Image (cartoon, rainbow, N blue to C red):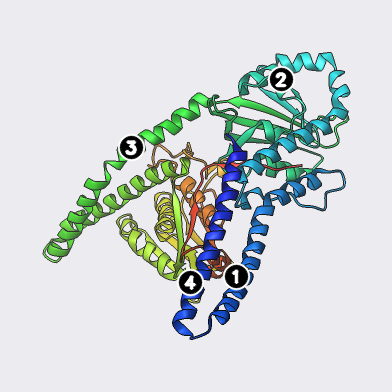
Amino acid sequence: MDYLSRTKRQFSITILLSLIASNFLIIAGWITLRSKLQLSNIDYALILGLLAIILSLLFTLVLTKHLISPLKAIWQLIVHISPNGSSVNAPNIDSLKIGHELIANLSMQIYQLSSITNTKKNEEQQLTQSANRNFIANKLPLPLFILDKEETIVFSNHPASDYIGLNQADIMGKNFYMVMDMAFPSDNTLDTWLKEVKSKNATASMSWERVKLNVLDNHPTLLFDLAAYYNKDNPDNYETILVLFDHTKQYSQDDQAVSFVALSVHELRTPLTVLRGYIEALEEELGKEMNPELQEYMQKMNATAQQLTVFVNNILNVARVDNDQLQLQLREENWSEIVQSAIDAISLRAKVRGIELKSSIDPDLPTVGVDRLSIYEVINNLIDNAIKYSGKSTKIEISSYMSKDGMIETSVKDYGLGISPSIMPNLFTKFYRDHRNRAQIGGTGLGLYLSKAIISAHGGNIWVTSNLGKGSTFSFTIKPYTLLAEELKNSDNNEIVRGAHGWIKNHSLYRR
């Protein structure tokens, strides 16, 4: 890709458009003066000359700011990575209007050169590493990486280079994040974990499931579990050890299964909509004439149709999340009205199960910035889960109020089966279900995964507290609309569009 030529074209187009705009404004000013004022030709010339000077100064300032920004970004980057440049922040390449691809490419090259220069000091030590240690590591049948305190790769075994499709010469001495473009299914990434343990712990270990890796354009996407061990100030400069457990085939089959099911389920939407329409029409037309037994049948049919609708929506939206195709349009909404409307919509399903939904919603809650349909889905999923796992309990409590940190917090509490502490960390993982009751209680294991993706896209958090045998409380937070006002000012209309992404990038592109 010829990024330089593209940047030159961007410069030329920007200058051309500026000249056209300036001339257009001068001509428009001349026409306006001629129609509004009766002046001599000399007066017209003086006024238009002054207007031309003002417009020239204005466009010069604007053009200078935009055209100099790529050069400023390179200057800022070089100063940032210099030994005495820690006080200068790394440039925000994404904010560049002109030359974004060129500067991003040059920045990556500069980082790579800087990384190579910094690691030359350790080259002798790497070459004289213990032959015994290298032998053991290379005989390990799993990909292994060892990082120093700067997260530079100081060792990788042969299975690691074979796994990611790179030569060891292209791996050694490079920053780990430049080699491994990883994405995680949650915001608990390797990068965030290392930042935390480096500030608090001398040693620590951690593992992740369903990590995604993109290495090269011609290399297939890899899916694996990752295990990490951290040892601060290791004398051999082996601060972080990473081991990869490949599950590409298994996890790919799961993802393909979702795509296939989504394709199949999509065909259910039309007949399901027709079915729900007929049920509602029958209830309206014959509701008073039906005997209690028929009314009960109609209620169960309606509740089952609603449950099937939730299933269809979950499948389709999870497929959109995984493909980064689910877009949310955040608008100003009345939160109390949304929560109560969602409760009313699912109350029939609870009634069929003999469960009472009790709500406690603060009437003074401020408006929120949400995507109404997706938030309905979150509330619906949480209440539906509470209904499923209520056991013999007949009460579910839904509350919503302003939290101490200025967020609007909503909770769904049941008094049913509860959740074992051993499975709590995996609740919001795709396809995960409690093995103890999956045979007795239906479900796909997608509702909580989707809810977390939607809430994260709204800028909130979702969590659970539970006592086994006593019930569970699922809670989530949403930002008041006022906190989104600044973001809205920068948009072109009255809505904020966000994507609900199933995968979280492990790191920002630019690191020291």
User: What residue sits 71% from the left and 35% below the top?
Assistant: 109
Q: Label 2 vs label 3: CA separation?
A: 42 Å
Q: In this view, does 471 lie above or below 186?
A: below
Q: Position of residue 114 (x, y in %)?
A: 79, 36
Q: Which mark is residue 28?
A: 4
User: What residue sits 62% from the left and 64% below the top?
Assistant: 59
Dot 1 or dot 2: first in sequence order is 1
Residue type for callout 4: Ala
Q: Label 2 vs label 4: CA separation?
A: 65 Å
**Mark 3 falls on what kind of element?**
helix
User: What residue sits 55% from the left and 65% below the top?
Assistant: 22
Horizontally, residue 480 falls left or right of residue 99, namely: left
Q: Which mark is residue 263?
A: 3
Q: In this view of the protein, which residue sits in the foreground, 48 or 395? A: 48
Q: Position of residue 409 (x, y in %)?
A: 54, 64
**Mark 2 falls on what kind of element?**
helix
Q: Where is residue 439 in the image (x, y as percent from the top left)?
A: 40, 36
Question: Which residue position is annotated with label 1?
Answer: 52
Q: From where the camera sits, is residue 398 visible?
A: no
Horizontally, residue 151 falls left or right of residue 308, namely: right
Residue type for callout 2: Gln
Q: Quadrant of the N terminus?
A: top right
Q: Residue 168 carries which label?
A: 2
Q: Where is residue 248 in the image (x, y as percent from the top left)?
A: 53, 26
